[in-house]
Image (tube, coloured by chain):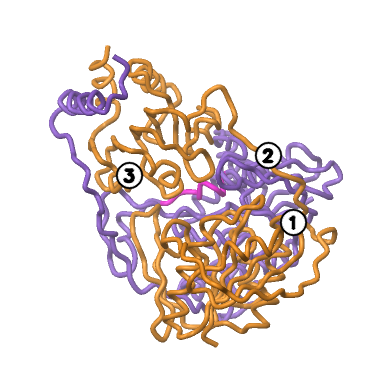
Chain colours: A orange, B purple
Amino acid sequence: MSDVLAVADHRRGVVRDVSLELVRAGRELADDLGGELHLAVIAGDVDGFADTLSLEGVDAIHTVDAGEEFNHDLYAGATAALFEELAPAAVLMPNSVNGLDYAPAVANSLDLPLVADAVGLSYDGGLEATREMYGSKVETTVEVSEEPFAVTVRSGEWPAVEETADVPIEAFEFDFDESTSGARVRGFEEVGAGDVDIADAEFLVSIGRGIEEEENIELIEELAEATGATLSSSRPIVDNGWLPKNRQVGQSGKQVTPDVYLAIGISGAVQHVAGMKGAETIIAINTDPNAPIFDIADYGIVGDLFDVVPALTEQFS
Amino acid sequence: MKILVTVKEVAEAADDFEIEGTDIGEQFLEYDLNEWDDYAVEAAVQLSEEYDDVEVVSATIGPERAEETIRMALAKGVDRAIRVWDDDVAAADLDVAAKTRLFASVVEDEDPDLVLSGVQAADDGFGATGVSLADDIGFDWAAVVNHLETEDDLSTAHVHRELEGGVEELTDVDLPAVLTIQTGLNEPRYASLRGIRQAQSKEIAQFGLADLGLDADAVRSPLSRTEMYEPETESDATYFDGSADDQAAELADVLREKGVVAE
């Protein structure tokens, strides 16, 4: 019982990057444990996905040819069945939106301890996982005293494995009738279309919770107008209905790659950073000197946006 | 119809804080209703306003201090509340499985038709209790729900799950179900003065492990937090100092240099 079973993520015919990162995390953990890395590929074009995932460090790929897209009953059931078959020490799943929809069920049904949203893993006689708490202000070490265990890993924390290899692929039989599932996927919808595509902007002025009130957005609009910038925001602004969804930058919003990203009153939560870290130059204005946004910023102003922004607008008026 | 909403009182760390042992010092923590749960409460209350004979019950695992947060939920329209706590729970390091066992016992007592839960808690961010609970009690479920409509006979919920990259999954879920609620699903109301007054007289029932038919084994956890530290700052940012005008002038120079400002 020293192997690792990792479950790949894909959507609409494409293997998601987190799957390549899971291979790295799984390989490292399997090395610590002294075992093999088994990869599960469930639903859709499993043979095509298995080809994509034939990567260095994977010892075997198990394909579950059932269903077209993600269904949590299929994923939870197939993962649990594979777990029973392989008896690994650990099952790794992505902390993606789909991971959130089945990983806790896998842990519960197999009675495994669950560490969610790990950003680091090591094993030396017991699992030690690194997690964040309090909105990324602190990191913690969590020890798990039982085996086997289940872990979901945060995307973007392990480098993707890209070196291909010749990995044995085995079909795993799992009977699944989606019509009997209590949750049935009817389709997908793109959201956030609109008159402005922030993904095309060269200069984004982006606002977060620090703006405090809806009427304060006017300050930022004046700055955007004076500088010719495009206005975007972090999630809470859109949740509040202060800006439309097509302005949201982040994991569940748009990925943006402007020349300059000016983050105003944005703390830099991991989900937001996932959408804007590709900006060429990042500038942050925030009152909290410990805000995570400063970790990725090229230029920083620790200060009150209500003082700095009007002064900046003045520079271009 | 009965809707059970799980409500957590979460801790938020002040901008400047100190770590004491494996947690942030109590004096640096402020407590509030978990943001995701606020949207779940609103969804439940809206359903109670839309349909006749809907009772909304909240369930919280937390110490007496949490009653302040629970009163906030009651003031927003929750009919009555349950708080789970005793010395054994207080002494435990509750993991997902332990919380699942506690809530499963509450579900067994209450027999709800729908359970709503925030996707995650702002403090520890596991994001797992709702789905784990659903699996445990044999309900159907959907995680990360940002749009919710129900059939009039309350047999099915039509939900959108918010996936990454601006894509939503449209899913039908049979009730009874557990839905984990994403922020943005609705606009959580502010508690009215009348609501706040009424909340004072609403019931908060307190249950210990024995009341739920459980013993200390139910909260035993194989997970333990052994360290907490501030991550090393990776910042190599150039900071602008001085007055707001000085800072703005330096920033303006950078923007001009980068060539992104319309002249």
Q: Closer to us: mark 1 or mark 2?
A: 1
- The amino acid at mark 2 is Glu
Which percent across, then down, holds residue B161?
A: 65, 47
Tell me the subunit letter for badge 1: A
* Left or right relative to A233: residue B220: right
Please tell me which residue lies in front, A86 or B214: A86
Which percent across, then down, holds residue A31?
A: 43, 80
Relative to A161, say whether A272 is above or below.
above
User: Which range of residues does the magenta coloring cover?
Assistant: B31-38
Tell me the subunit letter for badge 2: A
For the residues tagged 3 and 1, is the chain the same? Answer: yes
Instruction: Look at 77% across and 49% down and name the residue there.
Output: B172
- Which residue in the protein does label 2 denote? A189
Q: CA distance from mark 3 to mark 1?
A: 39 Å
Answer few, some or many: residues within 10 Å of disc 2's Cα (few below 14, many 20 plus, some between 14 and 19). Answer: few
Which percent across, then down, holds residue B76?
A: 60, 40
Give the residue furthest to the right.
B153
Q: CA distance from mark 2 to mark 3?
A: 31 Å
Please tell me which residue lies in front, B20 or B183: B183
- The amino acid at mark 1 is Glu
Q: Earlier in the sequence, mark 2 or mark 3?
A: 2
Answer few, some or many: residues within 10 Å of disc 3's Cα (few below 14, many 20 plus, some between 14 and 19). Answer: many
For the residues tagged 2 and 3, is the chain the same? Answer: yes
Q: Secondary structure at mark 3?
A: helix
- Which residue in the protein does label 3 denote? A293
Magenta-colored stretch includes residue B37: yes
Quadrant location, the C terminus of chain A: top left
Instruction: Look at 27% across and 54% down and name the residue there.
Output: B17
Which percent across, then down, holds residue B255?
A: 26, 26
Tell me the subunit letter for badge 3: A
Q: Quick check: marks 1 and 2 in contact, CB under 8 Å? A: no
- Which residue in the protein does label 1 denote? A68
